Amino acid sequence: MARRLTLSVERFPIAGAFTISRGSRTEIAVVVATITDANGIGRGECVPYPRYGESVESVVTLIEGQADAIGAGIGRDELTARMKAGAARNALDCALFDLEAKLQDRRAWEIAGLAAPTPAVTAYTLSLGTPESMGEAARAASHRPLLKVKLGGAGDPERIAAVRAGAPQARLIVDANEAWRPETVEANLAACLEAGVALIEQPLPADADALLAEIPHPVPVCADESLHDRAGLDALAGRYDAINIKLDKTGGLTEAILLAREARARGLSVMVGCMLGTSLGMAPATLLASQADFVDLDGPLLLARDRDSPLHYDGSIVHPPEADLWG
């Protein structure tokens, strides 16, 4: 039996709403690639992201374009050579990883040459809102050890202060999603320092972040939208102290593993992050969690429902996946 590729588009409701500087939504759409052969089935999930020019339709088309190659038995390295980094390649790469694990009766981390993953503390995200609403959300989540705070530009110092007052003991990551501007970035950095923030994600737009090489970083600054895969590392020199690795940006776990190693070699700290997704989308990224400085794999915690055989979360502790889910 030749390998067969099938696709499904699935929608999951968010618990409430999820708001960042670019907008708000109440559900997510994910694309699941399933690769079947005579002896096993592998699955991979991706989240098309409009910020990177992706839609559900475009990602489905890209994946469908690889059906013949998948049927012919290509592997992950060949896939990387055939497709550019992005959500479509992520779904296929993770499906191939899962299929390899099933066929070899081994766990995916063994195939990847990684240490067995261990439980890790994940950030829990607070959506963008008014200082008052974000302070209240921080109080409700103040039992969590690590909070990720979505910011939006004007009024961010007040938001940061309100969150810190609401959760005085939590470590804080702030994520501006490119919303700061050159005239406000230093004041916002100072507000983060005052609040004891541990990391600042993507303060400036990806095409206007050169200023970061010219100003002090009182709090470490992490590249998200400014970096997708290893090809973008050179451009970060002097601008960033850390990178956020997301499989939907790297185009799968295969590239993510290589990116993490190269970033470490360059002295960059590593965050393992995610788009909003289900446990199937988070599972491959947990393989990198134990070697990351920050983990942000809270996607399923923000959904109203998840998959069968989901990842196990014990508060903010995310556990590695069972084989029934992935890998």
Image (cartoon, rainbow, N blue to C red):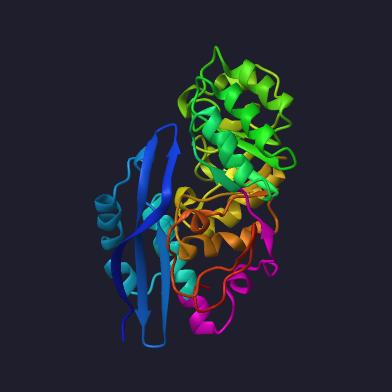
Q: Is residue 213 above or below residue 163?
A: above
Q: Is residue 238 above or below residue 39?
A: above
Residue 296 x/y as whole percent: 59, 50
In this view, the residue in front, 153 or 76, is: 153
Residue 75 visible? The answer is no
Q: In the shown orientation, is residue 211 left or right of residue 62?
A: right
Residue 100 drawn in magenta: yes
Q: Is residue 111 above or below residue 279?
A: below
User: Which quadrant would residue 303 be assigned to in this image?
Assistant: bottom left
In this view, the residue in front, 10 or 233, is: 10
Q: In the shown orientation, is residue 255 left or right of residue 7?
A: right
Residue 46 drawn in magenta: no
Q: Residue at x 49, y 70 (%)?
A: 97
Residue 294 x/y as whole percent: 67, 48
- Count of labels shown? 0
Residue 81 visible? The answer is yes
Residue 145 x/y as whole percent: 70, 49
Q: Residue at x 68, y 70 (%)?
A: 116
Q: Is residue 323 above or below residue 58?
A: below
Residue 2 x/y as whole percent: 31, 82
Q: Residue at x 26, y 62 (%)?
A: 64
User: Which quadrant would residue 221 be assigned to in this image?
Assistant: top right
User: Which quadrant would residue 1 be assigned to in this image?
Assistant: bottom left
In this view, the residue in front, 65 or 30, is: 30
Bounds of the magenta segment: 99-123
In this view, the residue in front, 181 or 172, is: 172
Q: Residue at x 60, y 46 (%)?
A: 140
